[in-house]
Amino acid sequence: MTREDEQARRLATIPGIGVINATALLAAIGDGSAFAKGRDLAAWLGLTPRQHSTGGKTKLLGISKRGNGYLRKQLIHGARAAMPHLAAKPNQLGTWLQAMLARAHPNVVVVALAAKLARIAWAVLRHEKDFDRQAPAAA
C-alpha cells in the first residue's frame, strides 16, 4: 500500500509510524484538511489532557480518550516502540524527549510523543513533504 500511495509513503518517514499507522491515519483523516492545526488532530484523537474547571480553577486530568480509539492506541504503540531510539538521537526530537523523560513518568512521555507524532503526521499531510528528522519537531 505505501509503495503505491504517496501520502502513506510520506507518513511512513515519521519514526513510530509504519505501514499500519500510515494507512490507519489516511483512512481516518484523509489529507488532514478537516483540522486547522496539528493540535486539533491530537485533541480529536483524545491525546490531549482532559480539563475540568470550576470557580476559576483549572485542573488538567489524564488524556480525554475521545475520538478514534484504534488510531490512538496505534499511535501510542508506535511512540512506545520509537521512544528509545529517538531519545538517543541528538536532534530536536531526541532533545525534547530527553527533557521530558527527566521530568515525567515514561508512560506520560509516551502519550506526549504520540500526540507529537499525530501533529507531525498532520503537518506532513498538509504540507506534502517528507518528515525531516533534523527539522524542528513542533508541528
Image (cartoon, grey):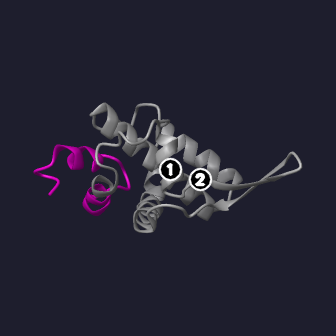
Residue at 15%, 48% (x, y): give it: 5
Q: Residue at x 46, y 47 (%)?
A: 41
Please tell me how crowded label 1 is: few (under 14), some (14-19), or many (20+) other residues with Cα within 10 Å.
Answer: many
Residue 20 falls inside the magenta stretch: yes
Left or right of 127 in this view: 134: right
Residue 109 seen in this snapshot = yes
- How many numbered badges does the structure rendering display? 2
- Residue named by callout 2: 48
Q: Which mark is residue 105?
A: none
Disc on the earlier residue, 2 or 1: 1
Q: Residue furthest right?
A: 55
Q: Could you say which quadrant of the image residue 70 lies in?
A: bottom left
- What residue range appears in magenta? 1-24
Mark 2 touches mark 1? (CB < 8 Å):
yes
Choose between 120 and 98: the one closer to the eye.
Answer: 120
Q: Nearer the viewer, residue 78 or 45?
A: 45
Q: Which residue is mark 1?
A: 42
Where does the N terminus fall, quadrant-wise? bottom left
Residue sitting at x 40%, y 33%: 134
Q: Nearer the viewer, residue 82 or 62?
A: 62
